[in-house]
Amino acid sequence: MKLLVIGGGNMGLTYSEGMAKSALMNGKKVRIFDTDPKKITKLKEENLFAVYDNLEEVLPSADLVFIAVKPYHCEELFEQMKPLINPQQIFVSLMAGVTIETIMQGLNTQKVVRTMPNLPAQVGKGVTSYTESDAVTRVELLTVRNLLDTTGASIHVDTENFIDASTGISGSGPAYVFYFMESMLEAAKKMGFSDYDSKILVSNTFEGAVELFNQSDLSPKSWMDRVASKGGTTRAALDSMEDNNVNELIKEAAYAAFNRAVELGEKKNK
């Protein structure tokens, strides 16, 4: 399998590294295309990839192509790609808000997989939702899934609406967690803890809570009930959150991201 990643930025490089280190490549190097001379030099120094700055040299022979550029670059990129592709190639998009229809029309192709990755993929803890056009076969989709899984886990969804929805949960979700962490860090420092101790208190608390959740079948509500006792400190904190409607505000924030993802997709289709 000849695998090409177009775009050597954060997300493109994250998936390139995950795939390059997996047994799926069977010792063959992942090919990366980019136009930034500094990135190209750096990538070549790593000696983990086959690096190209000319699409004509690498795109026609690729079996599977990951597109990992900023969405606003896609139209110009598609114009460059279109004369160089063939009907058997599979295109996997890591671009937010760019629909399958937009990619199919832009490239005049049929085999497209659209994904929604997230930032923890950089540490092998990512979750990528994905869906495909009708022309992608089950075997081809399994290959794509195995490649996506090299950066964490993947979830197949039936329609692109769920891609937009997962943007509001997993795609943008790490920022919600960081937002909560930042608030807790500020509270810890205000209570007198040092920067270092504040970070340990907050990061280990998050890591431990997630591990407890993952290792059991208990719901978050059940875990909250285990931590909180009537009239105790945790109950005082949870009551404060309920009084301030934090639960609804978090859900509204997730829907705001979801709705924005839909808007971006509609704009690209026009």
Image (cartoon, helix red, strand yellow):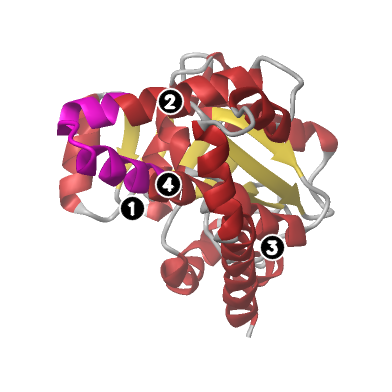
- Quick check: is 244 in the magenta stretch? no
**SS for tag 3?**
helix
Q: Nearer the viewer, mark 2 or mark 3?
A: 2
The residue carrying mark 1 is: 54
Q: Residues within 10 Å of mark 1 (few under 14, many from 20)?
A: few
Instruction: Determine which residue is flagged by label 4.
Output: 180
The residue furthest bottom is 270
Please report the bounds of the magenta region as a residue range.
Answer: 180-200
Q: Is residue 150 above or below residue 101?
A: above
Q: What amino acid does circle 2 point to?
A: Thr
Work out whether 196 lies above or below 72.
above
Element at label 1: loop
Q: Position of residue 80 (x, y in %)?
A: 45, 67
Task: Give the mark nearest the N terminus, 4 or 1.
Answer: 1
Disc sitting over residue 218 in the figure: none
Q: Residue at x 34, y 32 (%)?
A: 50
Which mark sits nearer the N-terminus, 1 or 3?
A: 1
x and y percent of residue 241 in the render?
Answer: 55, 51
Judge by depth and name the residue closer to the eye, 173 or 41: 173
Instruction: Decide which of tag 4 and tag 2 comes sooner along the chain.
Output: 4
Residue, x 44% and y 50% (percent of image)?
175
Amino acid type shown at disc 1: Asn
Mark 4 burial class by Cα count in 10 Å: few <14, some 14-19, many 20+ = few
For image coordinates 22% across by 25% down, the residue present is: 197
Q: Is residue 77 visible?
A: yes
Magenta: main secondary structure equals: helix
User: In the rendering, which numbered label is found on residue 205?
Assistant: 2
Q: Secondary structure at mark 4?
A: helix
User: What residue sits right under mark 3 in the picture?
Assistant: 100
For marks 2 and 3, the one nearer the N-term is 3
